[in-house]
Image (cartoon, helix red, strand yellow):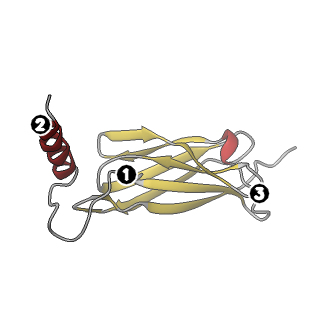
Amino acid sequence: MSIRDWRIVTASVLLAACSAPFTGGDCTLIVRPAVTVEVREAGSGRALADSASGVARSGTYSDSLKPFVTDNSGKLAALQAYGPAGTYRVELQRPGFQPWALDGIRVTATHCGDNTVALRADLVAVPTR
């Protein structure tokens, strides 16, 4: 393949990265999550995402929550899920804590992808006997 052919292929890929490349600014090639969930202990604010699991659902679509970001001490503090624009329900559980869920999370999109919705789950410990 010649240099000219590579330039055409590269230009085609860059233009295809955004459905409307010349309206409303530059699109990035970064895929953004639909939702992020900061997982904390209610009261203390201690990061709890390390042993948490969950799912984000919109209609028939679902994605499991995956590691997203750590806090200053290096402990996992937030999880993320990807998906199309829509209305989501996010469910989260962690051993030793009550399940957490939130409905009606509206994820919108621009011509360049999802507008991430940032959530915070303050988990309440299960009472010990």
| Residue 84 coordinates in the image, percent (x, y) | 29, 50
Please identify, in this view, whether the residue under mark 2 or under mark 1 is nearer the observer: 2
As drawn, is 23 to the left or to the right of 48?
Answer: left
Q: Which residue is mark 2?
A: 5
Q: Residue at x 30, y 63 (%)?
A: 108
Residue 60 versus residue 38 in the image, above or below = above
The three-letter amino acid code for the residue at tag 1 is Ile
Residue lying farthest top?
1
| Residue 98 coordinates in the image, percent (x, y) | 67, 48
As drawn, is 24 to the left or to the right of 82?
Answer: left
Please identify, in this view, whether the residue under mark 3 or under mark 1 is nearer the observer: 1
Q: Earlier in the sequence, mark 2 or mark 3?
A: 2
SS under mark 2: helix
Q: Earlier in the sequence, mark 3 or mark 1?
A: 1
Residue 36 versus residue 25 in the image, above or below = above
Image marks 3 and 1: residues in contact by CB distance under 8 Å: no
Query: Is residue 98 or residue 110 the one in the foreground?
Result: 110
> Which label sits on residue 46?
3
Local crowd at mark 3 within 10 Å, few (<14), some, or many (≥20)?
some
Q: Which residue is mark 1?
A: 30
The three-letter amino acid code for the residue at tag 3 is Arg
The three-letter amino acid code for the residue at tag 2 is Asp
Q: Residue at x 71, y 47 (%)?
A: 97
* Quadrant assignment, res 94: top right
Q: Earlier in the sequence, mark 2 or mark 1?
A: 2
| Residue 5 coordinates in the image, percent (x, y) | 12, 36
